[in-house]
Image (tube, rainbow, N blue to C red):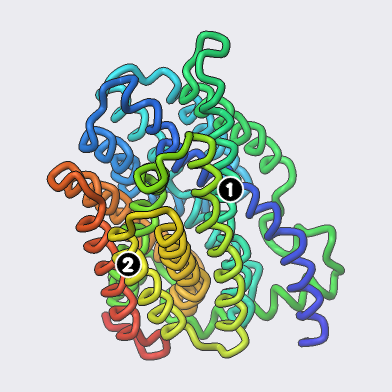
């Protein structure tokens, strides 16, 4: 069996991860491009720091409300059709952000974007649990989730170029940014509809023996998973504990994503294009760290300390970054903060899926992600409100960094191998 499983997993990694990675790059760009748009949009529309941070964060309210039902629907109707629906609808709404004219339309469209995208990320994680055995899962998830940092690498320079189109065709640069970065999601949605295999038995690039071996391995592991039902997932103490721990990750992730361009602008005074280039550096460092930590976590089979130590590095570095007053130390500290944060993701989701199976996995993954993503609303608003009160980033970044460190400590209390708490 092992001799057949190993090439099957390798093939699945080669065929699935790059494609899912591309989808997540586009997803993440459409979610965070508002951070680059803000370099022009806030002044053009008269948005304050509080208005901007509220609009940036309101995405996560609708996203959170619809996350669990969306993922349960995905498990019922199939990933191919549901992920295609998600991508087409979010691409249309994202492009529609070009029509923002007031705080009200900003809030409404960000809320609709969250509703459209709800279920995409936990849906992909659920799909990965049906393809990759536990021992290979952190590396697979880390490979998929490097899209978060690659989106930052690509998104910075690309967004800078699009902002430079200010005035072309009668559109502002920030309007070009939303239109150009929204269209790929629609196109890729139709590609998903035609090409995404649901499970190993649907993959033409696996031999019959490889399909059978991979399916048998995953089904065998499913018998040892302790949570298999929607009710079990939604009432599991471990799932809720992980959800609380995960809450701290989006707090820092989106505080960084939505405010990074303005942080870099404040310490560098550079042009919008150069800000985009400088903003890509932390993500480039994080991409390497994320893959290395995910691979090491799989090799050792250890999850919790990989998460906790990464959280300590990310949180402390972010807190110190707020006190940097020149571009070099700021970029170094922001790079460490982003690397520590990103390195948590592969081991975290490998841990979170290690005791979930069947429809319970769809519900449990969605619960962890939905509760966690409330942090995506909290993080940007902490920075926005504190900056409005102090005219500085330091205190807000210190608070956000401390929250991440606390999340790492909380993960150490989770034992996935004991019997369910409830």
At numbered mark 2, what does the secondary structure look like: helix, strand or loop?
helix
**Residue at horizontal 41%, vertical 49%?**
257
Nearest to the observer: residue 399 or residue 362: 399
- The disc, 1 or 2, on the residue closer to the chain's N-terminal end is 1
Give the quarter of the image for residue 100. Answer: top left
- The label shown at residue 25 is 1
Location of the C terminus by quadrant is bottom left
At numbered mark 1, what does the secondary structure look like: helix, strand or loop?
helix
Nearest to the observer: residue 394 or residue 133: 394
Q: Residues within 10 Å of mark 2 (few under 14, many from 20)?
A: many
Q: Nearer the viewer's eye, disc 1 or disc 2?
A: 1
**Residue at horizontal 77%, vertical 72%?**
10
Q: Where 274 falls versus 73 (above or below)?
A: above
Nearest to the observer: residue 280 or residue 376: 280
Residue 215 horizontal/vertical position (percent) = 70, 73
Q: Residue furthest right?
A: 207
Q: Is residue 231 visible?
A: no
Mark 1 to mark 2: distance in Å?
A: 24 Å
Q: Is residue 46 left or right of residue 310?
A: left
Location of the N terminus by quadrant is bottom right
For the residues labelled 1 and 2, say whether their Cβ atoms are less than 8 Å apart.
no
- The label shown at residue 243 is 2
**Residue at horizontal 60%, vertical 40%?**
84
Residue 148 horizontal/vertical position (percent) = 53, 55
Q: Is residue 26 left or right of residue 399?
A: right
């Amino acid at each position: 069996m092992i001799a057949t499983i190993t090439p099957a997993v390798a093939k699945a990694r080669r065929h699935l991860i790059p494609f899912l990675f591309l989808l997540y790059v586009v997803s993440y760009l459409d979610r965070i491009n508002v951070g680059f748009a803000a370099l022009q949009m806030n002044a053009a529309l008269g948005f304050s720091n509080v208005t901007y941070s509220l609009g940036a964060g309101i995405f996560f309210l609708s996203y959170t409300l619809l996350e669990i039902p969306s993922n349960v629907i995905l498990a019922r109707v199939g990933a191919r059709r549901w992920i295609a629906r998600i991508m087409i609808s979010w691409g249309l709404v994202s492009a529609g952000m070009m029509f923002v004219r007031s705080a009200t339309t900003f809030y409404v469209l960000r809320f609709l974007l969250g509703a459209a995208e709800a279920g995409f990320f936990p849906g992909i994680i659920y799909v990965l649990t049906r393809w990759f055995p536990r021992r290979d899962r952190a590396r697979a998830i880390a490979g998929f989730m490097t899209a978060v940092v690659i989106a930052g690498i690509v998104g910075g320079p690309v967004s800078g170029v699009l902002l430079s189109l200010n005035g072309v065709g009668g559109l502002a640069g920030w309007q070009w940014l939303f239109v150009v970065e929204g269209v790929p999601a629609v196109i890729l949605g139709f590609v998903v509809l035609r090409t995404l295999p649901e499970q190993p038995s649907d993959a033409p690039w696996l031999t019959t023996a490889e399909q059978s071996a991979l399916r048998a391995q995953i089904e065998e592991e499913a018998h040892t998973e302790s949570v298999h039902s929607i009710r079990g997932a939604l009432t599991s103490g471990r799932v809720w504990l992980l959800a609380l721990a995960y809450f701290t990750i989006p707090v820092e992730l989106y505080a960084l994503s939505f405010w990074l361009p303005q942080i870099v602008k404040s310490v560098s005074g550079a042009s919008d294009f150069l800000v985009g280039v400088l903003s890509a550096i932390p993500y480039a460092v994080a991409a390497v760290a994320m893959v290395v930590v995910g691979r090491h976590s799989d090799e050792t089979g250890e999850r919790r300390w990989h998460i906790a130590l990464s959280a300590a590095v990310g949180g402390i570095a972010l807190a110190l970054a707020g006190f940097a007053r020149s571009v070099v130390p700021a970029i170094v500290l922001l790079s460490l903060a982003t690397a520590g944060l990103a390195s948590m993701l592969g081991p975290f989701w490998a841990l979170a899926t290690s005791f979930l199976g069947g429809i319970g996995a769809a519900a449990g993954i969605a619960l962890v992600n939905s509760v966690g993503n409330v942090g995506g609303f909290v993080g940007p608003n902490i920075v926005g409100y504190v900056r409005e009160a102090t005219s500085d980033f330091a205190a807000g970044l210190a608070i956000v960094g401390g929250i991440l460190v606390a999340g790492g400590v909380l993960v150490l209390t989770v034992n996935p191998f004991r019997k369910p708490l409830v």
